Amino acid sequence: MNTADLARLQFSVTAGLHFLFVSLTLGLVTVVAVTQTRAALARDPEARATGMLRVRFWGGLYVVNYALGIISGIVQEFQFGLNWSGLTHTMGNVIGAPMAIETIVAFFLESTFLGMWAFGFRRLSARAHLVLIWLVALTAYASAFWIMVVNGFMQNPVGHDAGDGTARVTDWGAILTNEATWYALAHIAGAVALLAGLFLAAVSAAHLRRDHEVAFFRPTLAQGGVLAAAGAFVTVVAGGVHLVALEGYQPEKYVVMMGETGPALDEARAAAAERYGPGDWLPPEWVGIPSLLMLIIGVFLLLLAWIPATAARRSDAPLSRRRFRLGLATKLLPFGFIALVCGWLSREVGRQPWAVHGELTVEQAVSDVSFGAMLATFAALTGVLLVLALVDGALLSHYARLGPAGAFIGGPDMFPGPDDPDGGKEAGGASGRRAAGSAASGRDPGDGVDVHLTY
């Protein structure tokens, strides 16, 4: 293993872990925003209070994952300067602006809006508070867009000129409309919805298997199952469309992912050598394995993700008796994370040996540092991210097990009403207490409102 291999390994570990934080964050923020919108539009004070209790519970899990994800993102940013100075020197004029915009959006706008939302339950009007969570969601997806602009350029470099060895933008329109960016965005949008739905269903099912907070978690079990099924459908369709487009701008990757062997592989290798010069420009053949696994899991989840939602149907029998469907919800969640990792490997390893496809190799992009220095940064940054992942998992598990009683965002008397200019300090508090009492008794305080599916 040389320095470039170690740099690649470091990037794969740190970026892969950070991607898991981001994926769950993107999915959960949409769930929280939609849930708060429904609560704000509810006319019945008790239903509104119950809806806001759900916002506090799921919003708390979102905030935990977001906070640790931000730290992992900072760790990720270090790598560009430490390990990939060749990339920034050669392509900095192109990728620098989108990355700077993403940093401003994520670390300033999104974080500011989220802080105002998290601490503004009692200090802001209901309308202003609702606007804030939607601003958080919009800036989260805007941040993802700008990162994908950079990644899309690295997959399919367009709209630039690198005649003298330094890239310069010639057409921002081409860069921003890059097919490698937009196909991937559609695929990721489906994947994060799938993951969020699996997460909602798994947490809800874990409580319902013990007949705990049935009124609170019955609707979110249904919502999670439907959202996961819809996300799986979008993911599979977008992935299929993207695969067709891939043949046009990354033919070498397409051939390997499709499992071609013999003459077809030799022809692709010869065509790449004619295009880029002598050498073997095909990605490693094993990249087809995560690609195939991602496809299998996607179809598997498409067929099964909706089944737990059927356990939420009303009946006289306790929900805990529907053990197969509730157990299925908890067992499907890990497959969502596995599919995301497989998708990331397919996209990034499939670009090898290029850092920027057809323009800059990994060997040219890596910094001129010693193997020992690269090993030290690998150990330090990977260690930090592994600790963050463990802490994130422990905190999510802890607060998820506590249920609505452990909701720490806002407070028990912080339920903004749609027409309450002071944030619902009085009426909301009473409604919140009534909702908590109804949930404890097993009655659904949101009957007729919260049982409807969100998506």
Image (cartoon, helix red, strand yellow):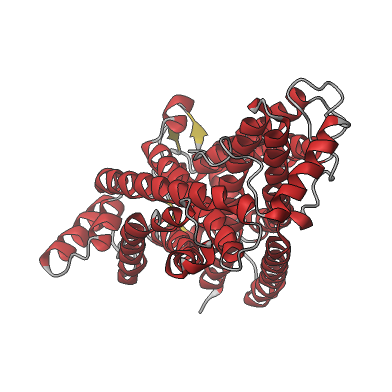
In depth, the one of 94 and 121 nearer the eye is 121
Q: How many marks?
A: 0
In depth, the one of 422 and 429 nearer the eye is 429
- On the picture, is 11 further left or further right than 409? left
Q: Which residue reaches farthest left?
A: 263
Q: Position of residue 279 (x, y in %)?
A: 30, 64
Q: Is residue 14 above or below residue 243?
A: below
- Residue occupying the point 37% across, 44% down: 234
- On the picture, is 273 further left or further right than 317? left
Quarter holding residue 376: bottom right
Q: Which residue reaches farthest front?
A: 316
- On the picture, is 287 further left or further right than 54? left
Q: Is residue 146 above or below residue 421?
A: below
Q: Is residue 340 above or below residue 66?
A: below
Q: Position of residue 259 (x, y in %)?
A: 22, 65
Q: Position of residue 300 (x, y in %)?
A: 33, 62
Q: Is residue 290 above or below residue 417?
A: below
